[in-house]
Image: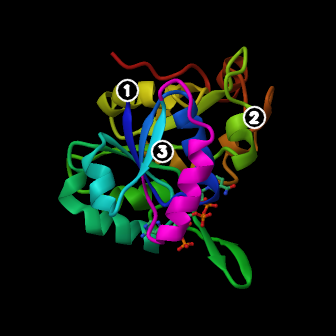
Amino acid sequence: MTSIALIGPGRHGTVIAQGLVAHGAELHLYHHRPAKARAAAAAIESHAKNGGSVTVAASAAEAVAAADVVFLTTLWDAPQRQVIGELGEALVGKILVDISNPLDVTPAGIMMRQPAEGSAGQFVATLLPAGTGHVKVFSNVPTAAILTASDKTPPAVLPFLADSDETAARIRPVLELTGWQPWYAGDISRSAELEIGGPFNRIQGRWGRAAADAAQIEALDGPERRTA
Ligand SMILES: NC(=O)c1ccc[n+]([C@@H]2O[C@H](COP(=O)([O-])OP(=O)(O)OC[C@H]3O[C@@H](n4cnc5c(N)ncnc54)[C@H](OP(=O)(O)O)[C@@H]3O)[C@@H](O)[C@H]2O)c1
């Protein structure tokens, strides 16, 4: 059983969570509004199969204490600063999975931002305490494709970035629980390529937008980076 914390289940995070529990993950959920936590848990639980489960934690710290891997699925910037700042040293030794794009949601609409660090992933890297693994994934994938492209033959490929080969090797079995084929594409410095408008986001693949098979990803980006 793989134990995962997921903090901030909204549109994208809830569907990612549905895919994880459908493939047997034990999910510990935290949302800062209890009513939204309950609604997300109900929407996720209805997808649980293969021993997968979801529980609602009373705090982000409680969710993280129960898991080795932490999916942070809030919007970028201020909520990421808040959650990572609050968790602090509790993240050390764990892997933080970052799905964000540099988009501000404002009353006037969604605004694209250009992070000073180069990408939302590189911004998140500046927030993490030393000793925390960092994975960038799902920024390129439309919410609607997460479940519809899972468990395909051949599989839809899920490109991911990691701060080290060791983190990449540790996260691979967790990402397999999405029903996509994880594909290690390099380090966090490539985040802009995985984020909105980047080549991995723009690809029209066999299974829809940004949902490509291995041959299509290899044609786009060359062979997968291998870990020892
Ligand atoms: N939606 C997509 O199509 C899509 C596709 C690719 C990538 N992404 C990326 O995925 C990320 C999430 O996007 P989304 O569309 O899912 O956003 P969303 O629907 O706004 O979900 C984020 C959730 O996080 C909650 N939250 C905020 N602060 C929190 C905290 N301190 N603790 C716990 N929960 C907190 C929010 O609650 P309140 O709003 O109630 O404060 C909200 O429900 C973004 O970075 C986005 O760029 C989204």
Residue 224 image position (x, y, % from top left)? 53, 21
- The three-letter code of the residue at mark 2 reads Thr
- The three-letter code of the residue at mark 3 reads Lys
Report the front residue among 96 and 48. 48
The kind of secondary structure element at disc 2 is helix
Residue 152 image position (x, y, % from top left)? 72, 20
Q: Are marks 1 and 2 in contact (CB under 8 Å)?
A: no
Q: Are marks 1 and 3 in contact (CB under 8 Å)?
A: no
* Residue 49 among those drawn in magenta: yes
Residue 176 image position (x, y, % from top left)? 51, 25
Q: CA distance from mark 1 to mark 2?
A: 24 Å
Q: Which mark is residue 136?
A: 3
Q: Which mark is residue 1?
A: 1
Q: Which residues are magenta?
A: 29-51
Mark 1 or 3, closer to the camera: 1
* Quadrant where the image shows the N terminus: top left
The kind of secondary structure element at disc 1 is loop
